Image (tube, grey):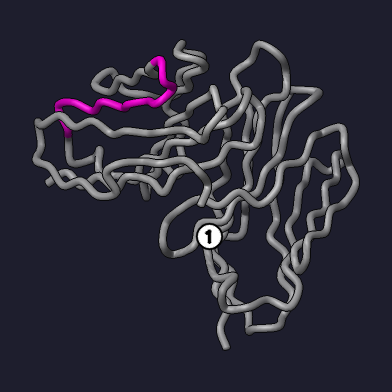
Amino acid sequence: AQKVTQAQTEISVVEKEDVTLDCVYETRDTTYYLFWYKQPPSGELVFLIRRNSFDEQNEISGRYSWNFQKSTSSFNFTITASQVVDSAVYFCALSHNTPGTASKLTFGTGTRLQVTL
Amino acid sequence: DSGVTQTPKHLITATGQRVTLRCSPRSGDLSVYWYQQSLDQGLQFLIQYYNGEERAKGNILERFSAQQFPDLHSELNLSSLELGDSALYFCASSVVGGGEAFFGQGTRLTVV
């Protein structure tokens, strides 16, 4: 069975601070996908990134960066110079990447990020 | 805008009733997923369809059913509704299984 753990329930930071959201996963698959989604107060789920388990390179997209470490089964998300608009619930998720298997997403419980002025 | 359309956005209904939630996937996406988000259960996978056929089932209650039509839109039917079915129901779509899943804005169901 797959499992995703986001131990941080809620994080509060002041604008311009850097913040890292932790994600630890469990899977027996040798190949899999990892995802991050953002859920702003309006409620929709916004796709941020997908990472294939083959690719352990870190990724940077503007103020966002992701650190994938297979050795520790972690896929952490850092927001640099946080802004009020970053306030949201962030979900880490995992899916199979094996032909013929269901590719549903297994979500963590989410981390609520509150950025204040 | 993810390209996935869900209707209605809000639904209020009484216990024991039946409702249908509708989802139009992104153009070209063959796979449709339904998820339920509630305060106590978090985001839970319900069911997946691929090109009209059921591909996988999660913790979907027997009172719930879904289908995907030839034009690839999908409907989630919830019957004999209970207060505990109140939740945000999301539809997501992807080109193939395992691709990044793009989510609709969700349908907020309130059972009173």
Q: Quadrant of residue A19?
A: bottom right
Q: Quick check: B43 left or right of A59?
A: left
Residue drawn at (75%, 54%), measured in percent from left and top?
Answer: A76
**Label 1 marks which chain's residue?**
A
Observer able to see residue A1: no
Q: Quadrant of residue A97?
A: top right
Magenta-highlighted residues: B70-81
Task: Look at label 1 and name its amino acid.
Answer: Val
Q: Quick check: B29 left or right of A68?
A: left
> Residue lying furthest bottom in this view?
A117
Residue A18 in picture, x, y percent from top left: 74, 75
Which of the pair B51/A102 is nearer the observer?
B51
Q: Quick check: B77 left or right of B71?
A: left
Residue B74 in picture, x, y percent from top left: 37, 25
- Counting the numbered discs, the total is 1
Q: Quick check: B38 left or right of A84?
A: left
Instruction: Judge the density around disc 1: few (<14), some (14-19), many (≥20) Cα neighbours within 10 Å.
Output: many
Residue drawn at (51%, 52%), measured in percent from left and top?
Answer: B1
| Residue tagged 1 | A89
Residue B34 in picture, x, y percent from top left: 43, 31
Residue A103 in picture, x, y percent from top left: 61, 24
Residue drawn at (83%, 43%), measured in percent from left and top?
Answer: A72
Q: Quadrant of residue B30?
A: top right
Q: Secondary structure at mark 1?
A: strand
Picture layout, residue B80 above or below residue B7: above
